[in-house]
Amino acid sequence: MIRYQGGSLEAFQEIYAQLAPGVRRYLSHLAGRSDLADDLLQETFLQMHRSRAAYNPEYAVRPWVFGLARNVFLMNRRAARQWAKLHESREELPEFPVFPEADKLGSQDELRRGLADLPPERAEALLLHHEWGFSFEEIAGMLGISAAAARARASRGMAELRAALNRMRIGMQKVRA
């Protein structure tokens, strides 16, 4: 990032290559639509370019860029006034999560449905921690909350996800019987 601040196009290309896939998945989760996620991804990196001089090299680049992505999403959401509508179509989300516990929890379809039923702030914290590997301190900085609140959201989200998946399994067993 320091090289990019100094004007290196190659440094930007390296940052983009490393971060764009994860940022796009994050934006897909937030937006619920892959076409909107593509637009938000481009806007995120445009915002990064515009604010590169404000970046503080004492901090990690990845949480800063994810924070920019979240702000881009929130600006888009406010402008569109369609928060509820954006989260209604979560069935179209790409395959995730891939965090270590995911395979033990359920199928991709079950996970997608379980995550869609979570409150958005809990699903977001859960995915930021378990899917993208951010620390609770980093999540706190991105979301504007305390590290304890980030930990609580992720923990409660995981507990609610497990409960939802158990309810799905019990429902499937009753259907089979």
Image (cartoon, rainbow, N blue to C red):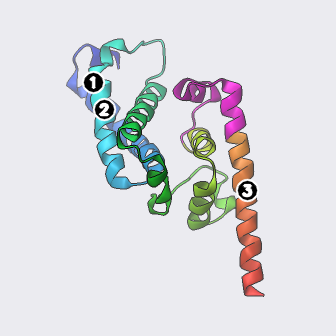
Q: Amino acid at mark 2?
A: Phe
Q: For the residue labelled by badge 2, is the local secondary structure a helix, a strand or a loop?
A: helix
How far is disc 1 from disc 2 in space, using C-alphas? 6 Å
- Nearest the eye: 156 or 3: 156
The quadrant in which the N terminus is found is: top left
Residue to which mark 2 is pinned: 45
Q: Residue at x 63, y 59 (%)?
A: 114
Residue to which mark 3 is pinned: 162
Res 5 → quadrant: top left
Q: Position of residue 49 (x, y in %)?
A: 27, 24
Residue to which mark 1 is pinned: 49
Q: For the residue labelled by badge 1, is the local secondary structure a helix, a strand or a loop?
A: helix
Q: Amino acid at mark 1?
A: His
- Tag 3 or tag 2, which sits nearer the N-term? 2
Is 59 inside the magenta-drawn segment?
no
Q: Position of residue 125 (x, y in %)?
A: 60, 39
Magenta segment boundaries in residue numbering:
132-153
